[in-house]
Image (tube, rainbow, N blue to C red):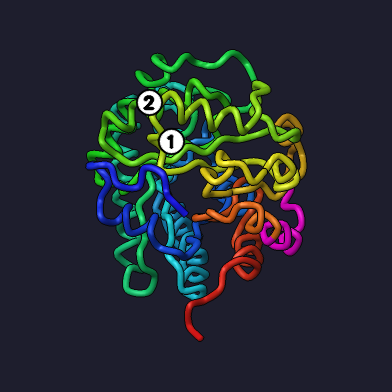
Amino acid sequence: MTIQNQSPAFHTDAICGYLADPRTYLTDGGFETSMLFLEGFDLPAFAACVLLEDDVARAAMDRYFDRFLTMAETAETGFVLDTNTWRSGTQWADAVGRSPAQMQDLTREAVRFARAIRDRWQDRVSPILLNGVVGPAGDAYDGTPALDAATAEAIHTPQIALLANCGVDLVSALTFGSVQEAIGFVRASVKARVPVAISFTVETDGRLPDGTPLARAVRETDAATEDAPLYYMINCAHPEHFRDVLTDEAWCRRIRGVRANASRLSHAELDEAGSLDDGNPEEFGVLHADLSRKLPALKVVGGCCGTDHRHVGYMADAILVPTRS
């Protein structure tokens, strides 16, 4: 299978090796929901970057990631290690109650924290890629008119450039709900010379929150950016929300990552929920076995809202096969 865009000049050996590796890699689960509901930490504006200011929270984060890296070690596969920077961009400073400079400091510290985890595990799990995570500029789920590409590029450029300067292996746009914002994000990443992945979120009908079909979102983003993304992902939706829109067409082979929600609830319903809906972890694994058949180019799998080590464990058992005989 030909892998699109695997060797531009700014791609590192780590990224080229990652894309060429036949193994499916693991990543973690629902980090923010785990820290909020399971660990009991406060996340202003759902921004987990503030946990880096608390030694107790940092210890909980270490334990959290250790669980998933243990699974990768058992499965004898690589790991994509996220920075907790989904809402550490300076545009979130007021909502989080920090200054723009403090948000930048938290972004730097998030990369240092992730690098320390990699250093601790790299003799047991290889490779571990540092993934600089960035969320949308606003609410990804309300379907309101989106940013145009130029505005999105301007908003996301500072955080992408900072993550690139801190030495992440790639940046990933998670829970993006519009094509134009994705296009702007890709263009900013290309200018920063950092590899980029785009992860769209979808509603219960498999369409983006603004109604755009997933196939069109992938095709239009590729067309506007000369196929610049390493690949696309789907996250923050239950597998049953999008599995029926997956086809054997070329656009679907561009989807190489899945991070699904535990719950079948819509985004609007989840916003109103007062407790965590963790669904059925064992069923979660079974559903991913089906997804892996629909997505033969699948490269990285993990969980999103409501998932923890149980969900990812069942999923790993269902789709990852250790190389050891």
Q: Secondary structure at mark 2?
A: helix
- The residue pinned by badge 2 equals 156
The location of residue 20, given as percent across then percent down, is 38, 59
> Within 10 angstroms of label 1, few (less than 14), some, or many (20 or more) residues?
many
Q: Residue 141 location, x and y as percent? A: 63, 27
| Picture quadrant where residue 245 is located | top right
Query: Picture quarter containing residue 118?
Result: bottom left
Image disc number at residue 134: 1
Main secondary structure of the magenta stretch:
helix
Residue 238 or 224: which is nearer the viewer? 224
User: Is there CB contact under 8 Å for labels 1 and 2?
Assistant: yes
The kind of secondary structure element at disc 1 is strand
Q: How many marks?
A: 2
Q: Is residue 142 visible?
A: no
102 vs 44, left or right, is left
The foreground one among 313 and 113 is: 313
